[in-house]
Structure formats: structure tokens, C-alpha cells
Amino acid sequence: MKAVEKTKVATIWLSGCSGCHMSFLDQDELLVDLAKRIQLVYSPIVDVKTFPENVDVTLIEGAVANEEQQSLLKEARARTKVLISLGDCAVTGNVTALRNAWEDGDRAVLEREFIDNSDVNAQVPTDVPKLLKKVRPLHEVVKVDYFIPGCPPSAGLINYVLTELLAGRTPNMEARSKYG
Amino acid sequence: MVEGDRMSKEIVISPITRIEGHAKVTIHLAEDESVREARFQVVDFRGFEKFCEGRPFYEMPSITSRVCGICPVSHLLASAKACDEIVGVNPPKTAILLRRLIHMGQMIQSHALNFFHLSSPDLLLGMDAAPAERNIFGLIEKQPKLALQGIKLRKFGQELIEKVAGKRIHSSDWILPGGVQWPLPKTKADYLLSNLPEALDITLKTIVMFKDRLQGFDEEVVNFGNFPTYYVGLVTATGGLEMYDGNLRVVDQKGEKVADQVDPAKYQEYIGEAVEPWSYMKFPYYKPLGYPDGIYRVGPLARLNVASYCDTPLANAELKEFKELGGNVVQSTFLYHYARLVEVLFCIETAKKLLENPEILSERVQAKAFVNNYEGIGVAEAPRGTLIHHYKVDPQGMIRWCKMIIATEHNNLAYNKAVTQVAKKYVKAKQLQEGMLNRVEAVIRAFDPCLSCATHAVGQMPLEVQLIDSEGKIIDRKTR
């Protein structure tokens, strides 16, 4: 029997809490089955440091909050067939976007943390990726093919979407996900 | 690359993978290309201390749970404890027992994640194994039985959280100022008790395996972040290992107590925070020693260094063995791995005791009150160390100011010292090899930093190692 080529899957963690990645791992024993069908080519849990070419499916957790994340997201889009917003921060901005309520939210959060709430060398760090003025959900930056809402989405929901995509079907999210 | 230093060169490892967060390491070289210093840089930031302002205090557990998807329960608990102070009530005993119980689930799943999913590829497949294999999926292929045990142990912790609090991650409907929302049904307690022996068995076997393999890691034990620091953690009134409540104990590099039974609400007298321009993670320091001399460590290694004993038999026996590795204190960061396994054992034994306590099934789980104090401080031991939430509210209970010092942050000075130590030992700039750099990452994995927490933020960019001269010219380059 000819070996079936594994589907190339990537996962990315932008500005979020990693809860969506934890929910991915919450597939528990199903991960063993998944390992037979997918190759994880790029992920925070994998030691590959450049986003590869020709990725079949990329799941992205977190909102877009700094310049580095913005360019990684664009790079991933250019190299991926199916791009999925994983979880509420990617889908809507969610908690990460709470700073958008301030006119200069980027400055406000930095000054509170690093100037007001510091004892020594109080200053805003500069030799780090610059925060974007506003936190954005993924689809405001690139085209997104599927959305998996939830904070975090359940492991069952993530498994359903992956299973459907691996079978060449279109996932139907209606009745599988609700707000809150 | 470093301004004002014409001869400096640097190597960048970015992103650091198999850790919970967005970071890179920059290795600065001296003129002869020996390693001068290495920096652990955190590259994302979200800003909870500002954007929580104006939210009702009772929303804080839900919001701050989103600081971290790996240890959300610790944030729920520290936050709820700060809220308990604001409402000025003591939660009923059963609520405390239940909070302690899910905290055990939290510790077990988080420690299992670090050991099996993130670090064991280095420990079992080897520091120099092919990068593409060095991950949990690689482990599933090469050592399926062991990988499955890791998955099952983590699942036990996650299910414990789910059965008690309704949801595995961000179970914020359950926690309340003054207690918890609902009691624990007996059927669920029985289910958890029925799964407990397997989790215990996996843990005991893993400890045996780790100790067997430890001899093969003599070099890492000596060189992986092995240096004197202070240690900070909560202990019980009699100095035992404590994770939910208790008071702070600080011991020095010789294991002598320099502060003991400190009310955690006085944390600001002991802990200050410094900033460096090259990282989004602040640098807490022990105030009596000043910055940067006040280097200290928290987390599993620190907790076992400060604790005099564990009040469960198997963990206590293991703790004695652990302590023998270092005389009075164990200094090697590599041994965080061992400390984590000892703690898993303690947590499984403690979960059993809690689940067998008939009071845990009581239906009285909530004390009701509104704002009675304008300030609240909640402190707990998160998997990675002491976690502090500090809120101030107005008479309507709206947050006016808040501050969080997160477990991972405390270790920031120590990370930098550790990556410098490992880089000096292993990185040879003239003949760079991937395995050298993986060792630098591995020492960070040993600490198990949770950077989503640390930056009240959290990633990923290319690993590109560049040797750059002072004019910005690339002399050598490696990617993976």
C-alpha cells in the first residue's frame, strides 16, 4: 500500500494566552490518531523556526498586536492554502483588544506597566517589537478561510474542524459554537 | 548591533520554541568571539494592568484568567483571593477545599505539559536530535508508550479542573469572590478518584525513569543555570510545602531563612520591579539586596528549597531525596525537572486527600457580600511560582488600579544569568551547531517560563543565527 502523504499543518500563537493551543492539546488521545495523518511543520511546540512553504492548514491563535506579528501573519497567509482564525482573540480581538478602548491604547498600557508600576529604571522598552496602535483580529489584516470561535474553542470543536478538513469536507460551525 | 560598542557581535535565537511564550535569546560576543553575555528577551506585551481599569472587580477572575491559558486556574485563584479581601469575607470551608482541589489539577496538568510535551524530547530523544523530531509528535512516533502516559497525566489534571469547575480552560463561571458558584457532585468526585491510581502510577514510574537518566545528564546538572540565588515561595504555618495559601519564606543561597512567615500582603516591602529597554518582561528583585543583586528564583525548585517538608508521605520521601542532591539547597536549574515531578506526586496525593474528605461534598460554597474594602491582595503559588494580584477599587467596586507580579517574571534575572552560563559553556561562535543553541533553549525550558503570563502578554519568528559585526555586516548565518 502506498503511504499517504501527511497533511502539512502549522499553528501560530500571536497575541493571546495560549489557551487555544492548550485546547488543541486537550484532544488528548486523539492526538495519537492525528499524528498519523498530519505533519506539524511549524508551531510553538515544534523546533522549526521559519514558516515553511506550501502549508496545507494553518491555525492561528491570538490577535495582531505588534509589528512582528503582523509580518508573520502575512507571511503565513502567503504560504498557506487554508488559514483558520483559532479562538476569540484571532476572531474578534477579545481580551487582547481591550486596550483599544483607550485613544492611545498602545502608549497607555506601556506607560502604566513600565513607568507607573516600576521601581527601578522606569522606561518604556524600545529594543522590542513595536506595538500596533490598535489590536486587530486576523481578518482585518489578511483573508481568513475559517473561523473557530470560543475562549478557548473546545478540543472537540477543534478536532471536528480538522477532521472535516482532512476528509476534504467543509466544516459547518452552525449549532457547534455559540457566544459565551 | 549593540550601540556604542564597536566590536560587539551577536547571535540571535528566535523564536525560542517549546516554551509557553514569545521570546528570543541574543548572545553577545566579545572581540575574540567568545561569549560575553546572553539576553533572554520577551517580545510581546498586552497590558492587563491598564486595560482592567474601569472593570467591575468581580469580573477580574474572568479577565485575568485570560492572562494565561496554561495556568488560568492560578490566576482565577489569586484574583478570587484579592476579591475575597475586597468583599471582606472568608469563603466557606468547602469552597476553600474545592479551590485547593482544582489548583492540584492545575499543577498536575501544567507540570505534565512541561515535562512530557515540551522538555522530554530533549531529555529522551537528545539535545542534538533532529529539530524536526524534537517535539511531542516526534515522541508519539519514537516512544509512543511514554508519550501516551504524558498525554494521560496531563488529561487527569485537565479533567480534574473540568469536573470541578465546568471547563478545562478559563473556567471562570465557577469562581466567585467569597467562594465558588457550585458544589462538587459525588459522582464527579468518584470519577476523579477512580482515575487517580493511574495518574499516581504514571508519576511514580516517571520519577524512577528520570532518576535513572539523571546520571546521563551530569554535565547539564552542573552547567544548566547552576548558581547561587535566593529562593522565594509560600509555606504553611509550620514550614510545609504550600500552594494556595500560607505565608512567604525567603531563603539565601545557603538555605538560611532570611525572611519567614511574611504576610504576602506585604510583598511590596520585599519585591521591587526594574525595567530594561530590551525586554517586555520586567525584572523583579529582592528589595533588601537592591537591583540587580537581589536575584532570586521561584517555582518548583524554589518551593522545594524553601519548604521544610511535604505533608503527604510519598512526596515527603521524594523531597528528602531531592534535597540530598544539593545539601541545604539545590541550585541547578536543570533540577527544576525533578522538582516538578516531586510536586506532581504531592498534588496527586493531596487531591486524593481532598477528594476523600467528606466535607468537600458540602453544598455551602459561597459567602455573599459586596465592596467592604477598597483594596485587595491575592497571592497563590502558580505552577511556575508565586503569583500576586493586587487591586484597588472605588466604592462602586470598579477597578481603579491593579498590579500583577507573575510567577515567571520573578525568575527574569535568573534566566539571563542561566542563558549566559549555558552560552558560555556550549556556544562556539566559530563553529556554530544547532545542538549548541538548543541547549541554550533547553535551560529556558527547564525553568518552564510562561511568557503569556509574564508579559501579561505571549510565539514565533525564524530561528536565524547571525554573527554580526559592529558595522552590521553579517559574517556568518545559520537557519533552521
Image (spheres, coloured by chain):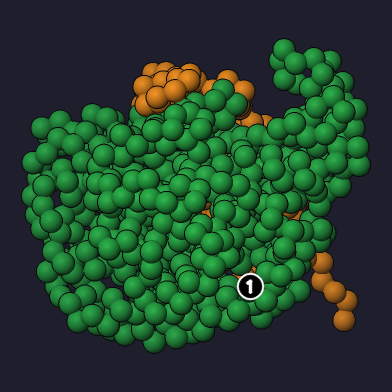
In the image shown, does B19 or A133 lie closer to the viewer? B19
Residue at point 67% right, 58% down? B221
Q: Residue B268's quadrant in the figure?
A: top left
Chain identifier for the orange-coloured part of the image:
A
Name above or below for residue A133 compared with residue B270: above
Q: Residues within 10 Å of mark 1 (few under 14, many from 20)?
A: some
- Relative to A29, A77 lies left or right: right
Dot 1: what SS?
Answer: helix
Badge 1: chain ID: B
Q: Is B204 located above or below residue B67 in the figure?
A: below
Residue at the extreme top of the image, as rendered = B4
| In the image: residue B167, left or right of residue B467 | left
Q: Give the percent coordinates (x, y) of residue B13.
A: 73, 40
**In the rendering, at what x and y percent does residue B189 appear?**
30, 80
Chain B appears in which tint?
Answer: green
Image location (x, y in percent) of residue B324: 54, 68
Q: Quadrant of the N terminus of chain B?
A: top right
Residue B259 in sight here: yes
Residue hosting label 1:
B210
Residue placed most toward the observer, B461 or B341:
B341
